[in-house]
Amino acid sequence: MNSLLSKTNKLFILTIFIFIADFLYSQEKFKNHIDKLYEYNLLFEGNDLESLYLKFQAELIIDARPNIKIHQAIKTKVKSNRDSILFALIEGDNVWFSNNFKRDSISFTNYFSAYQKSIEQNDSTLICESLNRINRYCLESEENIKDFGFYSNQYISFANSNYQKAKSKFFRLSYILQSNFLINNSLPNNILDLFNKDIAFCKNHNEIYVMAEFHNLLGVTYDVFYKKLDRSLDNYQIAEKIFSTQKKLNYFKTKLFNIYINKAHIYHQKKQYEPSNIEIAKALKINPKKNNIRIKRALELVSSNFQKLNQLDSSLYYLKKSKTLGDSIGLIQKAIAISDITEKYQAEKKEKENLELRAKRKQDKILLFSGALFMILGSLIAYLNLKNSRRKRLLAEQQKELEKQKNLTLLKEQEITTINAMVAGQEKERIRIAEDLHDNIGSVLATLKLHFENLKLNREKKHFNQEELYNKTEKLIDETYLKVRSIAHAKNAGVIANQGLLVAIKIMADKISSANQLHIEIVDFGLDKPIESNLEITIFRIIQELITNTIKHAEATEVTINLSLFDENLNVIVEDNGKGFNESKINFKKGMGLGSIQKRIEHYNGTFQIDSVLNRGTSIILNIPV
């Protein structure tokens, strides 16, 4: 009996140990994914709640807008306390990034809730995620200096990665600047030493994007506190150079927008009004969300610059645009205030209706039964609809496969037609050469033979003018040479003799486009010059192979083929709007596809480049000297 209890206890302890190990592994795995996120490696897989959270954050970085589908999917998966922390962070982000005028209090409520729960869970990664957002809120609100000091210190103490440490140092230094300026209207004597120390930390740990934020903040410090405009401008330019490496991401576009505006103010103070306007123009091209107030101030600055340049019409124009935007901002702020009141009223009204509904449900069991029956019927209908939709999707996929095979068949037919045309052209060329040799060269050679026989028979007898006969013979030899030369030139007139490269590609494109599944557009420039025969055939085969790949794999609806011949260099670009692919997963050393194309291009001393983005299409660029 004791032995049995001992085995049971060991099994229980082992189970607990496995559970704890699995939990710790899960936390470490999530931390690694968060580190990957802040390295801006934004491809995440999986449909569990943590994966969806990472995808949601990646979408915010890429597009600066919440992904509604992911938000709704996460909402349905919340089960544990840890899930509720992730959902609270996403709820806060959803509000923060959705409005032109942020409802800060709603976002902060969610962030603070996530912070409290993550402290209870003792999860340092989620604590850092919460404190990152809380400190961002404190930095932008400028009304919670004491809270900012507390939360920036908390962030430093919980930071568990180089990124989190660098970011916490940034918020801590921002707090020092804000608190000293707003309270004491001065800065500590060692503030520049603090900047240099934090920037060195970022540089040593390769946190270059946080380092860029420090340089931007240092630029503001040199401008506002020290009035050292050149040093301010130097730091803005360092930050701009770093952020520009990720300028495709909206997260960094917003940062670049702020830097351009800051640089414009520096140039204005230096009385360099035209460079100031250039920086503002760069900022307005970005036009990030939630920056209407800064855009209004930028337009006012443009107006002031034109006034200083004595361009009064332009100054008045931008002043009016600024006023119009200001009026719009006021209207939006009023609309949001009205919306808040309406939401509060609707919430109270809904609560009242819920109370009435609960009372009614207690009294009406029949209605509950009817509702249950309705749900069963609805579920049955939904199941049948789902089954029907699956059947339709299967049919659609089969139809799509048939269309793909049809396109491939058309492509093969085009290839066979082209080969037949080439063979027929070669046969006609051989016949023409034979006729030329028989009709032209043969008659000339026969005449030339007669002349030589005449010279031989009458070498001693001088019944005719021998000098004249020699001259005629020489002319016949020259004529024979010219005719042979003209035949050789005609033979080398170019590949695909009856069509030419461009015409052959257009015929192929028309045949494939006629299926109404893939539209191919041809754009050409400078192809009126002849190209060497073998090279034309190679290019035509490569384009055929690329179109075949598009039909098989890309799921595209449009393809553009650009051909241009300029300065003895042929450029070919094949672009599609298909689903794209990951270039790093292609093995160019195996198979007969892209690897074979690359080898053929390298044979002609050309270059081969692939530019593919998932869900945004593929561009393949060939450059070949001719």
Image (tube, rainbow, N blue to C red):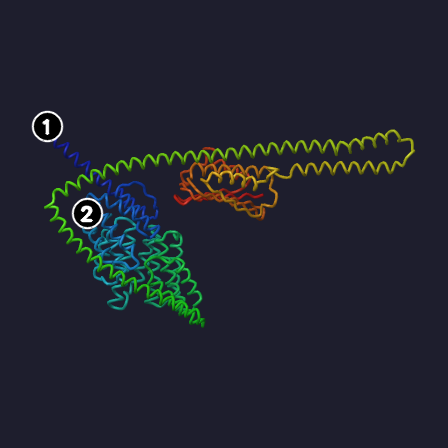
Query: Which residue is painted at 65% across and 34% down in the image?
Result: 429
Residue 122 numbered tag: 2
Marks 1/2 in contact by CB < 8 Å: the verdict is: no
| Rendering coords of residue 505 (x, y %) | 54, 40
Say which amino acid is labelled 1.
Answer: Leu
Q: Who comes first in sequence, dot 1 or dot 2?
A: 1
Q: Is residue 265 visible?
A: no
Where does label 1 land, which residue? 4
Q: Quadrant of residue 253?
A: bottom left
Q: Quadrant of the N terminus?
A: top left
Q: Quadrant of residue 422?
A: top right
Query: Which residue is painted at 35% across and 51% down in the image?
Result: 63
Q: Is residue 254 visible?
A: yes
Q: Quadrant of residue 551?
A: top left
Does dot 1 land on a helix, a strand or a loop? helix
Furthest residue toward left: 1
For the image shown, how many numbered marks are present on the structure? 2
Horizontally, residue 139 falls left or right of residue 300, namely left
Q: Of residues 284 and 178, which is closer to you in this image?
A: 284
| Rendering coords of residue 42 (x, y %) | 34, 46
Horizontally, residue 178 falls left or right of residue 362, namely right
Horizontally, residue 180 falls left or right of residue 246, namely left
Q: Of residues 570 and 378, which is closer to you in this image?
A: 378
In this view, 163 is above or below 592: below
| Rendering coords of residue 254 (x, y %) | 35, 57
